[in-house]
Image (cartoon, helix red, strand yellow):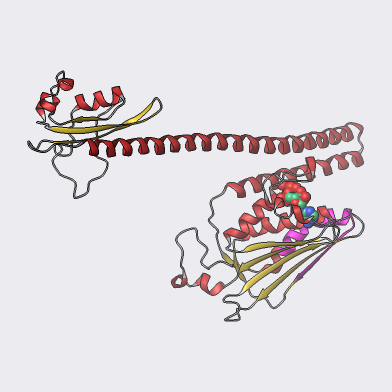
Amino acid sequence: IDMTPAVVKYATVPPEDDDEATIHVSKTILTHCVREGEGILSSNAQADPRFQAGDSVARYNIRSAICSPITFGDRTFGAIYIDSSIANYTFTPEQLALMNAIGAHTALALANAEQTARRLQTERLAAIGETVASLSHSIKNILQGLRGGADVVEMGLDKGDIKVARGGWEILRRNLDRIVTLTMNMLAFSRPKHVELEPTNMSPLIRECASLLSDYCEQNSIALMIDVDPEMPPVALDQNLMHQALMNLMTNAVEAVEPGDGVVSVRVRYHEASRPKRRRPVLEISVIDNGPGIPKRKINWIFEPFHTTKGIKGTGLGLAVTKRIVNDHKGRIVVESAEGKGAAFRVLIPADLDEHADPSATDGGPGTPRFGGLS
Ligand SMILES: Nc1ncnc2c1ncn2[C@@H]1O[C@H](COP(=O)(O)OP(=O)(O)OP(=O)(O)O)[C@@H](O)[C@H]1O
Ligand SMILES: [Mg+2]
């Protein structure tokens, strides 16, 4: 190994002279120590028969030196080296023993750190593999849906049967929607934490989400009810991200309920700050359904990425992304559900527009929403 010492840190101001910045050590002593794998104490280095081959001992006028290897098993990390050119000063065996102990501890820590880094790397690769497997599985299913739809369209066109072609087109469109949603969720999942807050009127945002689900609800006789507090002021949100978070929650709800008697309601409320109880205004969005609900033991599990009970129809990214978006808004999401009793997802987000508009009230750096979090 290359045993050329280099300055890593100075205790005082670094010297300007390049030569002074070079550390002169006895390579002869250092090499001997590392090669033999044992600590060395030399009380009179210039007369020491072990170091006669090299000239560094004489060149640097080294009188006494101690050197301990930093090795673990057959792995050599380096050595600790101290020398002195003071004629009547000699290092002691106790000092060597102490340095050997320091060398051994350092080596153990380094070996440990190396092993941890290797394990992390292995775990990372495994996680990437799992992610790619889940995503490609979903994408493959959607592509199969697209091809199936295209085949039906083609069949209808060949036969001149517009009804069949329209049926195929429905399949195509549904799968196009799925790949758009999946792509948006993948992007949201890997995006930086930054949120672009802007004053947002909740009513049009919720209605936009509802209109994207209205065809599905109509076809499956699901009642989708929207109830937005008409008095509420605009709130500070990242509109694109919140749109996506709400779509994920609302899609889950309409997918959970029984066609025929499914009811999904989305309720939006604005809670004024009421010091000292509530320091800042809060936006509350509830998405409530009368579906099968979520068993208690699965409540935490549903927010993990790629956990889905929908087989080929789900990827399991929706709630993971939604939770991230809500957290990035310094809010929180809570679920109330019991098996067979439906589910209620409640999103709570600090909603003070004033602090958002007033830069002097900011507390965070770039990427931090300009308001504090909810606890
Ligand atoms: N409203 C709900 N009622 C019952 N179960 C739900 C509800 N919302 C979510 N879940 C459960 O949580 C799981 C994870 O939801 P998530 O939205 O993360 O993934 P997904 O809907 O399965 O797939 P994706 O959203 O990626 O298409 C679902 O598979 C389902 O089991
Ligand atoms: Mg979902």
State which quarter of the image contains the N terminus: top left
**213 part of magenta stretch:** yes
Q: Residue at x 79, y 55 (%)?
A: 295
Q: Residue at x 32, y 37 (%)?
A: 101
Say if 305 sits above or below 36 in the image. Answer: below
| Depth check, front residue: 339 or 136 | 339
Say if 218 sits above or below 44 in the image. Answer: below
In the picture as drawn, the residue positioned furthest to the bottom comes out as: 275
Give the side of residue 165 with respect to residue 278, left or right.
right
Q: Residue at x 49, y 58 (%)?
A: 367
Dominant SS of magenta comes to: helix
Residue 113, quarter of the rendered image: top left
Position of residue 131 measured from the top left corner of the image (x, y, whole percent): 64, 38
| Depth check, front residue: 163 or 315 | 315
State which quarter of the image contains the C terminus: bottom right
Position of residue 370 measured from the top left corner of the image (x, y, whole percent): 51, 66
| Depth check, front residue: 169 or 72 | 72
Q: Please state the total of marks drawn on the protein image.
A: 0
Give the side of residue 31 with respect to residue 176, left or right.
left
**32 part of magenta stretch:** no
Q: Is residue 224 visible?
A: yes
Q: Which residues are magenta?
A: 206-227
In the picture as drawn, the residue positioned furthest to the left comes out as: 87
Position of residue 61 measured from the top left corner of the image (x, y, whole percent): 9, 31
| Depth check, front residue: 249 or 238 | 249
Q: Residue at x 50, y 61 (%)?
A: 368
Position of residue 132 measured from the top left corner of the image (x, y, whole percent): 64, 36
Q: Is residue 240 visible?
A: no
Residue 275, quarter of the rendered image: bottom right
Residue 282, quarter of the rendered image: bottom right
